[in-house]
Amino acid sequence: MSIKHILLFILISIFVSNSIKADDIYNDSDSVIMKYTGKEIVIESFKQNNNLYVQPVAASLITSKEINDFNIVNIKEITSLAPNLYIPDYGSKMTSPAYIRGIGSHRNAPSVGLYVDGVPYFDRSSFDVNINDIDRIEILRGPQGTIYGRNTMGGIINIFTKSPFKYKGTNLNLTAGNYNNYQAGLSHYGNVHNKVGYAISGNYLHSGGYFKNITTNKKADPIDAFSTRGRLSWRIQPNLLMHLILAYEYSNQNGYPYRVFDKETTEMDDINYNEHSFYRRNMSTNGLNIEYVTDQFKIGSQSSFQFYDGKQGLDQDFMPQDLYYVSFYQRQQMYSQEFNIKSLNEDSRYSWQFGLFGFHQSYYQTNDTDNRSTKEHTIQSAHNPTDGFAAYHQSTIKDIFDPSLSLVLGLRYDWEQTKSTSNRTTPKGIEDPVEDKTSFSQITPKAALQYLFGKDGLAYFSVSKGYKTGGFNNTAERQEDRIFDPEYSWSYEVGSKSSLFNSLIFFDMSLFYIDWDKQQISQTKTGGKGFIIKNAGKSVSKGVELSAQINPLKNLNFQISYGYTSAKYKDYKDYNDLTGVATSYDNHYLPMVPRHTAALSANYTLGINKAWLDNIVLNAQYTGAGKIYWADNNDITQKYYNLLNGKISFVKKDFSIDLWAKNITNEGYISYYFLNNLAKKDYVQKGRPFTCGINMNLKF
């Protein structure tokens, strides 16, 4: 049976069988309230209309309560909580790739977009952000190019911080755990007559590290990190609102707990290299959002500025011998401005939104490779300024041949120009600077049919084009390798969102098929030192997703998430520039893409109602991912692995104590793999072992 027949069959089945009950959606002067399955969410979205629940998009929502229940402390821990979402935990904060439905990238610009309070994060070195005092995380799966544009081919992760119009008071959080893990957080939220709201928070994290380097006799992966965030919300007039958000993070970590791996015996050596390896990052992110709201439309302006600099020191050979050491420095300054206007009349047959977006990104990097055996340095530096502009529109037309049938049409035009100035100093001398520039443009359309069963159900079918911009290989040594072009995809999706038995069960499901062309693939440079990106592949990703929440009792709920992805190369041949011989990887699975992701959690509140204790809250969580292929030739894999986490909370009014544990069964698994071309050996990083600890939470 072809994929088109499967899509048609499931779409018909959904239309025939669905019965769902959605709760009321209503507006107030500030926001849209969304209710379903016992959740009440205040939506302050710059672009999305109303409620993800009633839109033709596969989406997952992680609330602040769930972040607390699951004891999530960094963004990598949301892996598998949304179907087909995978964020590997390896190395350092310098690289945090995200994969959705098999679409992702771990060496160049991300293929999944990240926004925090509407501010775009364009570089992979900025993705691993602090998520303390977060209101909610939204994961939108599939291309989101119409509304969000640049490099959102896999999907979007939207993070929203807490609003002082929703939260009040002072919160103190203290954590202590094994492996010398400590964390302290303090935040305060307040407002004056519901017109001026203010918030400030600070968080400090220390981890003593999990894995020991036997050469240095020290832990290979400790980290110290500090972050602070401020927010000012001002209701200037009843229909004019401003949000100013300021955030700063500093982290200093010894990353890279890599060890030699024998793929024949699957045995791992100890971590065993001599040089101090680290990554330090300063990052400041600032946003100003202004909204003017009437009964008929909303006009919004989002201004942002992000700055970060990072320095990496790396024992590149990862051996006890003193062979190669690399010092890498990077700095980014990114400005963006977006204007958006959208209709708000939910009773109208026609709704719309228009937007304009522009950005300037200035990126610097310097790479110093020290050949310790010859005492020679090779220094490469590059400056890449990029300017971009986009215009977009999306319309929703209701009552298409039937009062319950709607049509969504979207169109976006993106243009950007990027320049490269690179300098290279070798033992032979200083080479002439190389300057170049190129530009890219693209139109990305979207169309979706949506069918509502009165207030009781939703089914949809969508087609959208994905687009990821091209760029420069700053370390390329040949002119023909300097520029790589954009990559493209066409995504087809059918899905349903349903509620059964008077909201006892809420579930959503989707089936997708993605055609991915001119794929940007990381390949080893001639000579084996470093990597370059080439448009070398064509792939297909297809799969199914299911999420469910079950509320059998008022104080008991279950959440289930499952995703299956089959992502394969359809045409990929890696040509050796020295020999001219091509290695074919046709029909091989894409690396770093789990075939299965799964999550199951249960939360039970036991009412005590004593003078000394109100409730005991029990939370258990299971997540799993795999099978994962680590290399294009599919010769090294991580089988499906399971992680079991748990937490018990003792709650008395505004005070609680939590006892928690992660990876309770001490499951051993590989969290990252790479081939070290200098050592001619395979290296892996192990997943984190069993950890446990205690939290204290106080609100006053």
Image: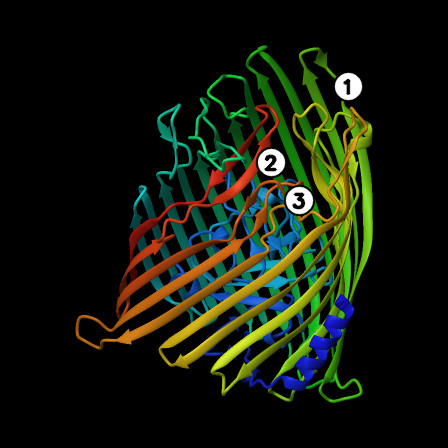
Q: Which residue is mark 3?
A: 109
Q: Secondary structure at mark 3?
A: loop
Q: CA distance from mark 2 to mark 3?
A: 15 Å
Q: Which residue is mark 1?
A: 432
* First of labels 3, 1 by sequence position: 3
- Corner quadrant of residue 70: bottom left
Nearest the viewer among 187 and 8 is 8
Foreground tag (3 vs 1): 3
Q: Quadrant of the N terminus?
A: bottom right
Residues packed near mark 3 inside 10 Å, few (<14), some (14 to 19) or many (20 plus): some
Q: Residue at x 42, y 53 (%)?
A: 73
Decide: is 215 above or below 69.
above
Q: Which mark is residue 331?
A: 2
Nearest the viewer among 149 and 389 is 149
Let me know if residue 117 appears in the view.
Answer: no
Horizontal arrangement in the rendering, residue 589 relative to residue 220 (left or right): right
Q: CA distance from mark 3 to mark 1?
A: 27 Å
Q: In the rendered structure, which amino acid carries the disc numbered 2? A: Arg
